[in-house]
Image (tube, rainbow, N blue to C red):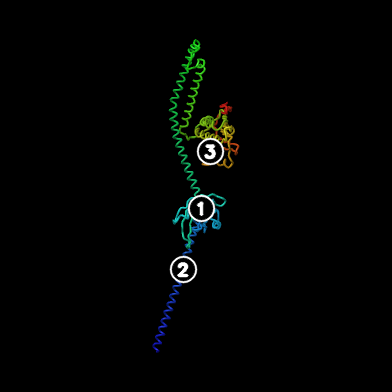
Amino acid sequence: MAAEKRDEDKTKQELLSELEDLRNVVAKFVDFEKEERLLLEERLKESEERFREIFEQHYDAIILLEADTLNCIAANLMAEILFGYNQKELQESFSRLFKNKREFGRFRKIVCDSRKKDFLIGQFTLVGRGDQMLICGVKGKNIKLRELDVLYCSFRDIKEKIEAEEKEKRIQAKLIEANKMTSLGTLASGIAHEINNPNNFIMANTQMFADIWRDSERHLEAQALGNPDLIFGGLSFAEVQQMVPDLLTGVVEGSRRIMNIINRLKEFSRPADNMLTGKVDINRVIDFSVSILGSQVKKYTDSFTLNLAENLPRVLGNSQQIEQVVINLLQNALQSLPNKSCGVSITSSYNKRARSVLIKVKDEGSGMKKEVVERVTEPFFTTKKDSGGTGLGLYISYSIIEKHKGVLDIKSRLGKGTEISVKLPAIPRTNRSSNSSLLVIGKGGVQS
């Protein structure tokens, strides 16, 4: 019995020892699990902090949305800067960024229809604080955050990119137009040559016919006296005698007009000289510009005044470039007129004290607001987009006058018309008279 008692006690001791070992193992496992959990929590915390740093420091505006409701969960600093709303305001109403319910509905549809991890949401016009309009490219990413389905949205302001692309398109269109003008110049030169030859025949033959008529007139007059019923082409000699000189004058005048057109075409087709070393006659430049736009003058107004001072000193520069300025200013003036009863005037004068030649183009058109006047010389700024305006005319004119060391000044009042002055430094000269000539084209035609 004693032996059995000892064996039983030994067995209990062994069991208690094993139980103690088991307890120690469990305790060690619990400590290990606790350490692992703490390590995992630390790593998760570090990961979240890294995500937060990346989230906050990203150069795009980032907004996290609940995938189902599209409620804002979080927004980074760039989102607050871009849209002007803090995170709390965005969480209260993410849809406030869209200009209307239709745009927000389009955003929701794109998001709901996409099952991709990464996808392009598209381009949206969004509204920031103070009704600031923003054009943004929006990308989306479906992610999981703590078992929550989240839409990671990045917003990038692409307004400058779009403006740059539009500017590039306008420049490209301008280059195409310049190429057309070059081709037109070549064509004009060929046409001028082709027209010039037959026109020379007309001039020479008309002169010969005039000589023949002078020699024949007295013989025909003698025959007509002896035969009063003598008819020439269905006309009596008295009628023919009166008509032929007028016919000859008309042919010669028509031929001279053709010659003037040919000369203008030749000047138009002549390659531009970018050197600003020519001695430019401003009155000749104005006359040429007005002749080029003669048909438009008649189309837009019944009252066009040209007042050019005589004996103007010349200016140093490029005549073709200054012609381009005058043509552009005159076109703008004509196109601003509400009706043909409103007038346009061009004057030239000399300011002896400033030693400058002055060109003024004045119209009785619709005029411009002060804020428009301040911007009209900016490249690509135009109030005539609907009618094909490029916004380059006044910018190029301003640049040309600036290169000529001159000044282009614009005065305008809405509904009261516009006056544009071009002041160019004159080449020193000896004293001359300053009489002026006045030419008016009114309803009755040309008057002097």
- In the picture provided, is 215 more to the left or to the right than 350? left
Q: Is residue 137 visible?
A: yes
Image-quadrant location for residue 16: bottom left
Q: Position of residue 75 (x, y in %)?
A: 52, 57
SS class, disc 1: helix
Q: CB under 8 Å between callouts 2 and 3?
A: no
Comparing marks 3 and 1, which lies closer to the viewer?
A: 1
In the image, residue 10 lies at what x, y percent? 40, 84
The x and y percentages for residue 167 are 49, 43
Alpha-carbon span between mark 2 and mark 1: 44 Å
Amino acid type of disc 1? Gly
- Quadrant location of the N terminus in the rendered image: bottom left
The amino acid beneath tag 3 is Leu
Judged from the image, the secondary structure of the residue bearing numbered disc 2 is helix
Give the residue type that dot 2 points to.
Arg
* Mark 2 or 3, nearer chain start: 2
Query: Label 1 belongs to which residue?
Result: 105
- Residue density around tag 1, few if under 14, some if 14–19, many if 20 or more, within 10 Å: few
Instruction: Give the crowd class for mark 2: few <14, some 14-19, many >=20 residues within 10 Å.
Output: few
Observer able to see residue 356: no
Which residue is identified by label 2?
Answer: 37
Q: Are marks 2 and 1 in contact (CB under 8 Å)?
A: no
Query: How far apart are the alpha carbons under marks 2 and 3?
Result: 73 Å
User: Under tag 3, what secondary structure?
Assistant: helix
- Report if the CB atoms under discs 3 and 1 are less than 8 Å apart: no
Q: Which residue is mark 3?
A: 394
